[in-house]
Image: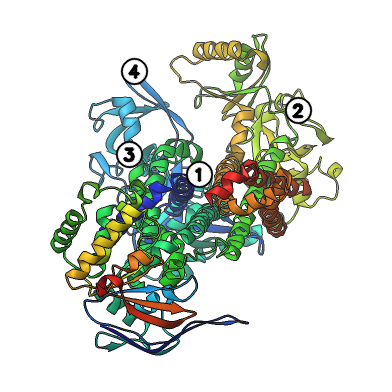
Amino acid sequence: MFKNYLVTAIRNVLRHKGYSAINIIGLAIGMACSLLVFLYVWHELSYDRYHPEYERIYRISTQLGPEGNLEGLAGCSENVAGYLRANHPEVEQLFRVQPLRPSTARAGEQAVNVENVMYADNDLLTMFHMPVVQGDAREALTRPMTAVLTREYAEQLFGDEIAVGQTVLMDTTRYEVTAVVENSPSNTHLKFGIIISWATFDLVDQEPWRHSWYGGYFKTYIRLADGADPADFEARIASLIEEHAGETLRQQGRRSFLFLQPVSDIHLNSNVRWEAEPPGNVTYVWILGLVGAMILLIASLNFMNLATARSAGRAAEVGMRKVVGAMRGQLIWQFLGEMIITAGIALALGLVMVDLALPAFNELAGTRFVFGDLLWGAPLMGMLAIVMITGGMAGLYPAFVLSAFRPVKVLKGATVSGDSGKAFRRVVVVTQFVMAIVLVVGSLTVYRQVEYMRSQALGLKLDQKLVIEMPTEAVNYSGHEAIKQEFESHSLVKGATFSTSVPGRWNYQWRCFPTGEEATNTQTINWYGVDRDFIDEYGIELVAGESFGPDCQGAMCEGIILNEAAVSAFGWPSLDEAPGKALFAGNRPVVGVARNFHIKGLQTPVEAMGMFIMSDDFRYLTLSIDASRIDDVVGFVKQKYADLFPGELLNFFFLDQDFDRQYRAETRLGTIFGIFTVLGIVVATLGLFGLASYTAQLRTKEIGIRKVLGASEGNVIRLLTKETLVIVAIAVFLAWPVAYLAGNKWLEQFAFRTNVGWLTLLLAASATLLIAVVSVGYQAIRAARANPVESLRYE
Amino acid sequence: MIRTVGLQKLYRTDEVETTALDNVNIEVKPGEFAAIMGPSGCGKSTLLNVLGMLDNPSGGEYHFLEYEVAKYTERQRANLRKQNIGFVFQSFNLIDELTVYENVELPLLYLKKTSAERKTRVHELLEQMNIMPRKNHFPQQLSGGQQQRVAVARAVVAKPKLILADEPTGNLDSAHGDEVMKMLTDLNETGTTVIMVTHSPSYAEYANRIIHLFDGHVVAENISQAQRV
């Protein structure tokens, strides 16, 4: 019997190739989109869940600040680790991590730039899932001057040779390679390139601040013993800082508490400063999840709609099967089975689409999925569920309604009217187009917001800036001007300036309060160390006081320039009052105030920041260039750098492009959203096209008669398109408030934002209406032009 | 085989009640070949549908074999029908998605016969109907006469006690019509009871008995000319 059903299902598909193609391809697209979205959402939700017993792993973070204005910091003071080891046996294991700046690693003739260099305790290798490729994880990071490499760097530095036992040079320090581990997967918030033992850190940095209870924030991870209550543990350690440094904190008017963050929560739910990498955005994850679900729903509704409409033509077959002995239950299983099989064919096609689309999707989403990622428990079950639900729903009408027909009805020549189920189909089309319009509005809103952020003036010049990352400690105060002059020697280089940071990159953050004021007025300030040319080169406008004077150099120049946001944060009533104030116990007088400028993307408000004349850490050299001859400039820079820093690898970037990474998450969201929106429209339109074709076919006789009686082509076209246009218009009016509210809700998170304007709503509605008109109109015109004689003869 | 007492069939809409059959009393013995004749709209097909348990009578009694089926449920009628009755229709009513073989096989599937049994029986009938070379063809690829042969094969594949034929020659030319009538006659000679609705007096003569209907009543019954001879 099953073979009979299978044969009938396949032959039905082949017999009506056009409709079958529309149906299957539409559903396949929906399934492919939802599978890709599932991969992405699963990836985002899976961060750090692959570590052994991750449920018991926590990061200890700190809340610090004035009462009522605490902010979270991703880490805690180093004393905490020692204290926990000594006094809390429920802490099974513990490791600390301290990121370093990117470095150049060398082995023999090989050199490579390394991101993600970190100091770490040995327990990292056993607490986190880090498969060892060479060496022994148990003691790889216990001795000073030892390092563990990830596979990619081991291969780049040592090729096929065994790296363990060899030496790697990082900047000017040699380390013995004690192990090689697998590369960090993409779904971890803590990615490693090269790990240096914490014992090395203890050896090279014995600054007293490291042993302060309230300073120095090292990322500290613990694994609690099985059965330990994390809430209870957190409550017992929360006041640890206040117990040991309470007096100092009170003098500063600050409170400090420790709290636990489950390691699996950090990527999407952490809202603290100083994360190792920019966290994910849980809102975007859910938005994309919703988009994927909507497209699947559009496709599934399509599938059900068209299958239901066409099943009316199977009434004769149902009648005959009953005559020759089919029971109703057998017919129900037949139709359900047919639809599930068809949905299964769509799934197979959808999987092919996924396989083909994966490389491009990975590029877009910054992921590394392979097709095999879909072939396990949850996605497999999900796929099967989609097939069963979609196929089952599509088969419901023929299964339960048609199978109930008495055979005598169809044997008398009565057929099921094509109007049967019309109300349901209208509701389905409206629902589909409401979702499609919401997707279009959402997509346009994301696009407009990104363009808005990109187009806003930042308050400083980023264009035509080439930034060179200097080798560590290669530049000092006495030599930095000479280096600038070397680069300025080319006519295409208009200016140069050193700084500890550039917009879009990491910068120092220090907490301070105005000298002579209460410590309760402590604020977190972003700091740039700069040279005298920075303000002019970046086009920063001063609105009070003055810039760094010509005599201002190195340790002799203690003056600082704050921005307007810093002045406001300190609560000074006017900008003019700022010059003359001082920070850091009087050691840093404020000499001027700069107009606010953005050092981060426009998602966030302008933060308080300050600039001081640097005496060390000459990290970035910014060249103002003539960008009309980029190749010449780059060629010059490469040559000059090689002359000045022989053997050092050159890292440079164009500042405006680099700053654009601030909008990477939104750009990515917008692109994925846009692509999926287009696909959603395609699927909805396919469905409409199929239905329109079917409706025109059903009404062949009616159209023939109308034409014989005098109807023009225009009359017929209006007859066939009117209902669809009304349905889509209803969808527009239902979709507008939903899209408007959802769009504006998403925009609320941006400090600087556009809005969901009437033009966006109109554009979305117009585009959707146009697409609907074209797809239905094509069928209507065909039907209108048919020869009525042929139509009536056919009938 | 069949006995009806006061059989009645009414069709009701909101405004109109139509009597399709009224006080129909007929009896058909096992092995008989009965023809039902009458003008269009007299209730011939309705009577056939009721006899074939495709429709329930509105009143009266209907005895099929030893069963009184007038009050049977749909399920009970379906079970009785598939084991005992085969149908042949004017418009053949083959299933387009199935091949000749599969169309003929279908009743046996619903009777849950084994694969071997089905194969043997279907091949036997296809040979008998001289349609074996076309067993893998679809109905659209056959002529009217061939389709009707397939339909007859399907009707008899389960060895029913009764064949109901509703205008079996209506869509065929005379040659093919004669062919179909010969098949029905041959079946009847093997003991299968046949009741046939027809407009054609000449085809009615193939039957033993002709029942005349008019406006839902049996107005006459007579032995066919062929039988009288």
Q: Quadrant of the N terminus of chain A?
A: bottom left
Label 4 vs 1, first from the N-terminus: 4
Q: What chain letter is assigned to the residue under label 2? A: A
For label 3, the residue is A144
Q: CA distance from mark 4 to mark 1?
A: 31 Å
- Secondary structure of the residue carrying tag 1 is loop
Q: Nearer the viewer, mark 3 or mark 4?
A: 4
Q: Looking at the image, which is closer to me, B82 or A94?
A: B82
Q: What chain letter is assigned to the residue under label 3? A: A
Q: Tell me which amino acid carries mark 4.
A: Glu
Q: Nearer the viewer, mark 1 or mark 3?
A: 1
For label 2, the residue is A539
Q: Nearer the viewer, mark 4 or mark 1?
A: 1
Label 2 vs 1, first from the N-terminus: 1
Q: Kindly identify the residue that appears in the image at 70 percent across and 58 percent down.
A: A730
Q: Tell me which amino acid carries mark 3.
A: Pro
Other-residue count near label 3 (Cα within 10 Å), few / some / many at <14 / 14–19 / ≥20: some
Other-residue count near label 4 (Cα within 10 Å), few / some / many at <14 / 14–19 / ≥20: few
Label 2 vs 4, first from the N-terminus: 4
- Secondary structure of the residue carrying tag 4 is loop
Q: Are marks 2 and 4 in contact (CB under 8 Å)?
A: no
Res B86 → quadrant: bottom left
Q: Tell me which amino acid carries mark 1.
A: Glu
Q: Are marks 3 and 4 in contact (CB under 8 Å)?
A: no
The x, y position of residue B227, in whole percent, is: 25, 73
